[in-house]
Every structure is written in C-alpha cells, then in structure tokens.
Image: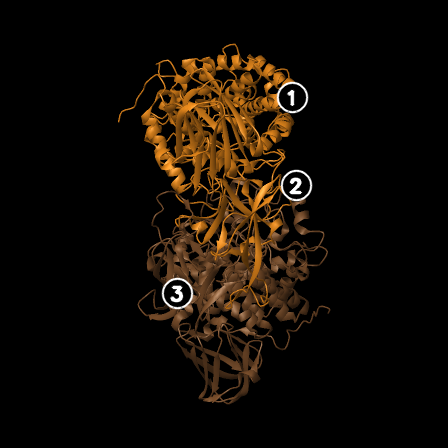
Chain colours: A brown, B orange
Amino acid sequence: MTASQSAKPGKSAFRPLPVPQVDIRGFWGDRVDAVASRTADILYDRCVEAGMLDQIDPDRDPPGVRIPFHVNDGFTASTVTTQMFWDSDLGKTIETAAYSLYRRKNDALERKIDAVIDMYAKLQQPDGYLSSWYQRVQPGKRWTNLRDCHELYCAGHLIEGAVAYYQATGKRKLLDVMCRYADHIAAMFGPEPDKKKGYCGHEEIELALVKLARVTGERKYMDLAKYFIDQRGQQPHYFDEEARARGADPKDFHFKTYEYNQSHKPVREQDKVVGHAVRAMYLYSGMADIATEYGDDSLRIALDRLWDDLVSKRLYVTGGLGPSADNEGFTSDYDLPNETAYAETCAAVGLVFWASRMLGMGPNARYADIMERALYNGSISGLSLDGSLFFYENPLESRGIHNRWKWHRCPCCPPNIGRMVASIGSYFYSLSDDALGIHLYGDSTARFEVGGRPVSLTQTSRYPWDGKISIAVEPDAPTEFTLHLRLPAWCGKAALRVNGVEVDLDEVVSDGYAAIRREWHKGDRVELDLDMAVARLFANPEVRQDVGRVALSRGPLIYCVEETDNAGQLHRVALPRTATIEAHDEPNLLGGVVTLSAAARRDASENWESGLYRTEPPAVDETKLTAVPYFAWDNREPGEMLVWLRSS
Amino acid sequence: MTASQSAKPGKSAFRPLPVPQVDIRGFWGDRVDAVASRTADILYDRCVEAGMLDQIDPDRDPPGVRIPFHVNDGFTASTVTTQMFWDSDLGKTIETAAYSLYRRKNDALERKIDAVIDMYAKLQQPDGYLSSWYQRVQPGKRWTNLRDCHELYCAGHLIEGAVAYYQATGKRKLLDVMCRYADHIAAMFGPEPDKKKGYCGHEEIELALVKLARVTGERKYMDLAKYFIDQRGQQPHYFDEEARARGADPKDFHFKTYEYNQSHKPVREQDKVVGHAVRAMYLYSGMADIATEYGDDSLRIALDRLWDDLVSKRLYVTGGLGPSADNEGFTSDYDLPNETAYAETCAAVGLVFWASRMLGMGPNARYADIMERALYNGSISGLSLDGSLFFYENPLESRGIHNRWKWHRCPCCPPNIGRMVASIGSYFYSLSDDALGIHLYGDSTARFEVGGRPVSLTQTSRYPWDGKISIAVEPDAPTEFTLHLRLPAWCGKAALRVNGVEVDLDEVVSDGYAAIRREWHKGDRVELDLDMAVARLFANPEVRQDVGRVALSRGPLIYCVEETDNAGQLHRVALPRTATIEAHDEPNLLGGVVTLSAAARRDASENWESGLYRTEPPAVDETKLTAVPYFAWDNREPGEMLVWLRSS
C-alpha cells in the first residue's frame, strides 16, 4: 500500500469538540473545579516562584544558575539547566488558565497571564524568533542543538497556550506572536535547499502546529508539522550533522541511542514504542493528527503497529507507561516493575492525547478503552483531589515514602495534568460531518452542529460509580446523523434502548461502538446500561512482576489498597481466588468514591524469633481488605500502597 | 558488666588450625585444587595486566590515570582512582599464592611473588612507611585521609599476605618489611599525646595486626589492633578533624554518614549492622579477635548484639549480605531484594571471617551454622567451578544478564574468595588447650597437638552430598581432650556413636555442639549421621520480597533453579506446597552435585493475544522443576536464575 498524500482530510475525519462546547458535571466536574479554582493559580504562582518571569521579562536581570541538566557539548555547561524548558511550563500554564476561564471567571489570573504575554511580545526578536532561554541565557546559539535543548518543544507549548488563550478570551496577542514565530520556523525548516532539515529532539511542535493551522486556517503550519514528522529519522541524520557542526562527537549523546527521541528510523518504519515516553506520545499524537488531516494511511499503519506494541507489551494496568527513570521511558517488553515504576504523569497525559487523536480516524474502542483507562487512573493520579499537589512518578506500589509534591525541579507534569483536566470535555466527544462519537460517559452537556443544525446532547449519569447513562438528544430541528456510543471493553453486559426500544447490539456494534443512525428529534432519549461488576485482572505471565498477583477494577477504575484502610505491610496480604468482592458507595470518602472490600489472608508475625528463615510456613490470619480507586491514593495519611495483590 | 581488659586470653580461647595442618579432600578439595591450579596464577596475571607492578616497582614509570574513585577533597582529583587499593589486591594475591603452595608446588608463581616482594622491599621508605599509591601517585599526602584512601587497609592486606607467605615458604622478607611498617604505624598511632588518634576508614588492619602478633609473638601489634578498635567512633571524631586539617568540610563526605565505615559511635555501643558490608565484617572480625585475645566481654556483648541484628534482619538466605550497590552495604531491616541484591562476594567472605572468629570464644552453632551457610552458598558462588571467573555481586534472581567476569574494575573479590578457599582447612577446626572443635564436615585430615601430644583426626564423608561422617581419632598416645562436634541447625535428626556406642545427644549437646570428653586412643571412631532431608525454607513475612515464596535447601546447601535445566521465564513456575521434592546424585553434572526435582506448575501463554491484562487467570501447565546448588549457578549456558520460587 502506498502512502496517500491527499491534501484533504479523509471524509470520516473526526475532530474533538472544542472545550467550551462541553459542560462537564459529576466526577469530572469536580476535577475541573479543582483545577479552575486552585491548580490554575498555583501553576502561575509556582512558575513565578521558580524565577521564570526573570527569564522572559527583558526588563529584568536574567536568572542565575539553576538546576543543571545533562547537556554540555558546545554549550556553557554551567548555564544548561532545566530553565531551557521554562517556556514550555509557562505555555502549559497559560493553556490551563485559558481552559479554566471557561469554567470560572478569574480576572486576577487573566491579568497576570496578559502580563506574561506582554513580556513574550516584548521579548520576541524582529525576525519572529522567541526563546527566553536562548535569548537570555545562551545568546548566539539558536538552532544549534535541536537534539537536546527543547527549542521547538518550547515553541510548541507556547503555540498550544496561545491557541487556547485566544479561544478562551478572544485575545489575539499571543496568537499573533506565535504565528510570527511559526512563520520564522517555517522559514528556517523545510525541504527547500536553503532550509535546515532538522526537527526537535523533544517532539511537541508537530501537534501544536496542527492546532495552530486549525485555528488560523493556515495550511502552511500543517505542512510544516508534516515536514517535521516526515523528516524525523531520515539519513544523513540531522542530529549527527548538528553535533559535528557544534564540534561535538555525535557518539557523546547522553542517552546513547536515538531511540531515546524516536529518531532512530523514519517514523513510518517504526514498530516499537521506545525511548522517552512523553516524547513518544507527543510524536504519535502529531502523527495521528497528520494521518487524519492528510488521510495518510502509511502513518495510520505505523501508528497501529506502535499502538499494538504499547498495549500488548509495555503498558501498566493503570494506563501508566515508561517504567524507567534512567531514560524516563521504555525498557524491554513486559518489563513493568511496580515499586520503581516511573510512569510519569506527563506520559499518561500524552497517551490520552495520542488515543484521542487516533479517534480522529473514526470511533474505535481499541483506542478509546485505553484513553479511558489512562484518564481515570494513571494520569489523574498525578493531581491531588484538591488540585494543589502533584505526582511526577506514578508507581503501582509504595512503601509509604512516595508522596505528593508541591512542585518538581522539572515542573512539566503539574501544568500538563492541569490542562488535560481543564479541557476534559473535548475528550468526551468527537464530531465528523454527519456523526458524533461519544467516547466517555458522565454527567455533561455537549453543543455541536450537524449539517449546520445546532444539537444539544445531555448525559445524565453517576458514571464512573454507576453504569447507567441516560442521553437526551435535542436537535434544534430534526436532523439525521449517526451517534456512535462506546461499549467499554471492561463491560461484560450492556443494554441499549432508544426511546425505550431495545437495540440489538449485535446488529449495530462495530469497532466497539454502537452506531445509531437516524433522524433525531427533540426529546429523543438513549439509555445505556453498562454492567459495572467488580473484576479481577490478571497480567500476561510474561510480566514477571505481576505473576501470581491480581488487580481489582470496577468500570474504568483500577483499585489499590492503602495502608490507612488496611494494616501496614500490604505485601503480607493475599486475596483468595474465591473471595467475594463487594462494592460500597462511600459518599464521604475521598470526595465520594465506591470502595471495594473482601475477606483476605495475611501472613502473621508469630514465632520468628529464631531468625529470618525457617522450615515452617508463616501462620495465616483472616483479615479484611479495603481497596480505593488508584487515582485517589495518597490523599490521606502517607502510607503504603499496592495495586497488584498477591492472589492465593 | 565492666570491660575485662585482661592481658591474657580467656582460658577457653579457641584458635583456628593453621592451613597446612589440615589436608582437605572431597568437595572442598576440588575447590582448593581449582584455586591452587588456576586461580592463584590468574590473580597474579590479572594484577599485572591491570598495571599494578608499574605502581609498586620504583624502577618503572608510575601508571597513568586509572578508574576514578569518589574522593577529591584536598587530593589530586584526576589521580584518585581504584589504584589506591592496589596494594590490598596484591596482598590478597600473595596470600592466595601462599596457601596454594601448600596444595601444589608452583615454582614459577613463587618466583613471581618473590619478585613482587623485592619491589615492595625496595619501595619501602627508610622510616618503614610503605604505600605504593601514596608514594608514587600522591607523594606528600600520607596520613591525611584515613577516611577515604584505604591506607591502613592496604597495610593490613600486605601484612596478611606476609604472614601467610612466611608460613607457607619460610621466607621472611615480606614479613620483615611489614613488621618495619607495622612498627612505623605503631609509632604514628596510639593513645600517647604525640601520636595520631586515627584509624582506617576501611577496617582490615585490626585483624591483620592480630595475625602479625600471633606469628611474631609481638604483643605491641595486638595492642595496636585493640587501640584502633577502642578508638573507632570516639569524639572528637577523627575523620571530622582530619577533613578540616585538609581544608575540607566534613559534611562533604561522599557517603554522608559515618555509619558507612562503622565509626558513627564507639564500637561497644553499636547495635545495628550498618554501612559498607565488607568494612563491617572486617571490623567485627577484628573485634572478635580482640575479644578472644583479651577476654574482653564488653566486645563480646556488642558483637552478640550485632550478630543478632544481622541474622534476624539483614542476611540473605544464601549467607549473602549488603543489598545495596549505593553504599555496597546495608539498608533497612528486612530489605532483601533478590534481583538487585549486591551481596558482594567479599562481604560473604567477610562474614565467614567474622563467624569463624566468634568461634574463638568457644564452639557455638549460632555462629558456625551461619559460617557454613555463607561458605557453601553466598561466598563460593563468587568463584566459577574451574577457578577462572568471578562474581562481584551475588543476586538471588537473574534475568540471565548477570554473568561471571574475568576481572572487575575494583578487583577485591577475586583474591578474597581465592584466599578463603585456599585456606578452608583452617575454618574446619579450632583448638583450645584441651579441646578441638569440629565446625565443618568433609573428607579431610587434621593434625594438631593437645597437651604436647600429636593427634591426627580423619573425617571420611561425602559431605555435603551425604550426611554420614566417620571420624578416626589417632593420638600418638592416649590423650584426654574434648571433641566438640557441631550438630547443624538444618539437621532435624542426628545420631552419634563413639566406637559403635550410641551417645544420648540430649546429655552432651550444648550451644549446638555435642561435647565428647574422654581419653582418646588410636583407633577410636566417631560416627555422626546427619539426616539430610530436602527442606522448604520460608522467610519472615517482614521480608516483602520473599512473601509467598519458598527456597529449597538440603544440608548446608541452598538451591536455585536455572534456565538451562528448566524452561525460561522462571517467574512463571510455582511449587505446590504438597509437591514431593526428590534428591538425585548427579556425578557428571557441575563437577558432581545432588540436584532436586519436583512436579510444579507453570503459568501458560495461551490466549493473551488481546493485550496485557484480562479477567481470566492464566492457564496452568504441569511442569517439572529441577534445582541445582546455588553456588554452582552460571557455570553453564548463561540464563535466568531464581532462588525464591513462588509457592502455590
């Protein structure tokens, strides 16, 4: 099959509903409220405390030496620090603030963001270039180390921030700044002989340029995104040539292999999910956008291979990914250590980005099931219930010393989880010319147009605590379109009724979605009943760390046991295969959750005075085990936590 | 209880039989042959290849920069390398060669060692000082960094080498050199006002000075050893003052806490086994020697507390110790990770040293049982069966990538295991004025004197493969003394006969030893029958890494499963509690071993196409499990290995 390079998107292209078109209530409403009322302000305050404004404001002294980073060839070693990606942290902070403004008026924050934008406008060079680190800390070095220094990555996040802020406030200032910068980038990079053939060591610019193209209607930004993707990993290798141009040896690359930044081979030839997990997710997200926009099957095929690799060999049951701290990323197949899991919040957020963009090629539960799992578990575990504290790593087991932080020396995760939560509405639905896909369930109202006709769609549900969903479809006038309703893979028994009439799912389900095509009228009701039984999950026995163990889930939620609900030393507990697991509504616990409980066994301490080892097995006590949703852990007393329980 | 500072040893002091007084055959005979015929030469050759002779030979250029080490305050950073402990590697190489000469004439090696000794004699300064690194690489810096630079540690190992070489060859040259150096050290360190109040950051000199005192009869060396022990950890802290004298901040100590080198408090107040594991073992060995020689109960009490801490909270089932690579040592109670176990060969060797010295205070199975476990498992695992390859780390689980090395950048372990094996006879027996303790069993003949009367004692046994031991006691003339026969803790059923007459063990056993006091005559026979059943061992449930798991043992040997005898992915295997485990003599396997086998279960791979996780537990296949002695692992094809099997 040859690559389709069609300039027009495929007919079935689905695009997410813009954030303000979805009102979120219920479970996600609480999360969005926490971000809009606390996290958005906290992000700005902590960026300021970190000294970021000293770097972008041309009227201040640039900041001194900060936390060192691992780049030193051809650069001023003492000044190569985490500062080099501060523009990205501000970009994501602006983006979080923008989405939060839809939820809650916040004039004080808006004024602060406006001031930051003024600084960026003032900092921008006459040719459009804009990088606070290169301009203020490494002057004269621009475009000399795309491999390590996050230059286009920072541009990408500022573009995303600019697009979101424009959409939320109507203010074009940052958008105009970033268009000028994007024009400059387009003048520097491209296939033309006089342009650089490079791309960023940390992907991000690609998906950002797609957003910029969509909001401005400027095709050239889309083409530039496609160029960066097409060029990645081609020979001669840009990062080799760039290193030599700096007088450095390409072999001195800190991470040794270009798998680290997914430039080890052209993207269409890639078949393993490798390297730095966040970079991988951002690349694949950009590839998915381009596959959708250009109807490019060659990218879609590569993405499907990569997806299969991830979900069949390299994904935690929480939707977390990237087990190793060494490369902040992937190791070998089935290597999924629990206690040392890196599973960066940003990586799970990135997986949500990728999965949602795979849905751009049409509703498919293959992607939406994983998106839901990453959303409800491994990503929002990164934000405390009150929106004030963060996890960078999201292990599946803890001895009690892994606790939420106020901030991180590399503060990428806090604004990433902030912007994802604040824009959650856009992950619920995607729209094509004549169809709406419902990917996520939960109390919410969406507004959209089909064939020029406004439609309102309201879900009423206690999801994820209950599987009953009632959907009111309210077109302004009768309108024919297809409603694609996801039937989650975790659900063993689903029932669907349209205006009270049972639908035979066997006849309408494809790719895990029930497709209901009809002329919709005001007052139409769709009722979906998803059986939400507690499930025991077992890992493929290739996963050495989970063998003989079991994880508990209910609906989209993965559960864990915490020390505070159980005795300590959770490793002593074993859950019998035959134990009945009960679900309990606990409206006053952790903001309102369903807990699970079961009778279990616990290795006892008696008679170990003689030493560490003996021929008599430990005595076993009866105990009761209580599990809470994984996303909610470490919101009470610090203590041990365990997802994969011993199964006996 | 106040400290007894008696100048005379306690009456019951037991000292190991000198190496040449024990002829070893059988299991240990094979090991000694491997060392004498291969390892001893290999050690010398690899020390030469590493460039060590360039450092000690005053007629050559000193070596260039080698592998950097983590010391740089007040020193020439670029030259602070692993070279600083090369004298110790040569000392242990000389010691291994010396013991090997008892076993096998090796004129070529002896000539090479003589040449090395000539170099040291030539290198020694007129005042007696001798350190190739300080003299050749850091001139002018002597005695300025006892904390980090292994100066007295190197002296200790050269003393041990000198004593052994003198005993084996009668050649005094190195012994005289080291006596002069010890005299110099005694002139530098001590309680007198004009002397330094220091001691070495890496203990070793203490036990070496005891050996030197014993062989020379010079009391002052013993007193110096005692001084180093008494002074350790006293305030004001020597390492603080020494750092400040170098112009360094004591807080910049790389390892942060003086627990690292056991100088965090005076030794008699210590109650936790902490820090660098080898250092700890060498310190406790020296303390035990001094406790024996001075009848010092205050040291014995501290040692008993430390022993209890080690064996009840911090010791692997293999007798390995020190789980962490970060400090090459101890972490927290019950923290015994299997795959990442550091468990340095030197640490298990050091535990054998300590345990054997605890027996200096009288036969006690509390110490001898652990000595035997460390000997047969976690220490000799560090040497390949043919004596040519080494382990530095001795994990209890491997994915197949942990394999034996030709050498190590820090080559402490190869000569340490070499000298221990080559001197194994001295661990079998210890002798007091009127008693012989038999701590280890195995085909061997010991010669010793009681009350001036020569006695020969011959064990005939297939131990450790069989628990039947026949002991012929052959005094030159009838002699009364006590024979202490160890009844191993692993043995559930023992029978003892003297000249065919059953002994009631209840009447004669104390501290795990059967004491037979009688007038012994030529032709007396003692028969010991130790039931050698296969045992399942369970760990205290405080050990999170071993919960739900079982280790197999038979006699003194801990077993493991290797990929080569089983299918790969050993984590899939579970051993049912009810499975019968059979022992098989395998004379042609791994130099002749007893293997264990059992019917077991194995998680199957079927039907995992849909992803990593599912609600159906894995199917289980019947399989056969074959285990081999842990010490013999990684002597065939590289592959996975596992000690703690899942128990089902």
Q: Secondary structure at mark 2?
A: loop
C-alpha span from label 2 to label 1: 55 Å
Which chain hosts label 3?
A: A
C-alpha span from label 3 to label 1: 82 Å
**Three-letter amino acid code of the residue under disc 2:** Gly
C-alpha span from label 2 to label 3: 48 Å
Answer with the quarter of the image where residue B478 lies. Answer: top left
> Is residue A185 placed above or below A210 in the rendered structure?
above
Does residue B182 appear left or right of residue A217 in this picture?
left
Which chain hosts label 2?
A: A
Is disc 2 in the same subunit as disc 1?
Answer: no
Find residue B106 and name its label.
1
Residue situated furthest front in the rendering = B500
Which chain hosts label 1?
A: B
Which residue is tagged 3?
A36
Does residue B368 appear left or right of residue B412 in this picture?
left
Q: How far from the left and from the top, in percent, is residue B26? A: 57, 33
Which residue is tagged 2?
A247
Judge by depth and name the residue closer to the eye, B37 or B332: B37
Q: How far from the left and from the top, in percent, is residue B417? A: 55, 31
Answer with the quarter of the image where residue B380 lies. Answer: top right
Residue at 69% in and 51% down? A237
Is disc 2 in the same subunit as disc 3?
Answer: yes
**Three-letter amino acid code of the residue under disc 1:** Asn
Answer with the quarter of the image where residue B408 lies. Answer: top right
Of the two numbered discs 3 and 1 in the rendering, the one whose residue sits closer to the viewer = 1
> Is residue B12 placed above or below A199 in the rendered structure?
above
Does residue A412 appear left or right of residue A187 in this picture?
left
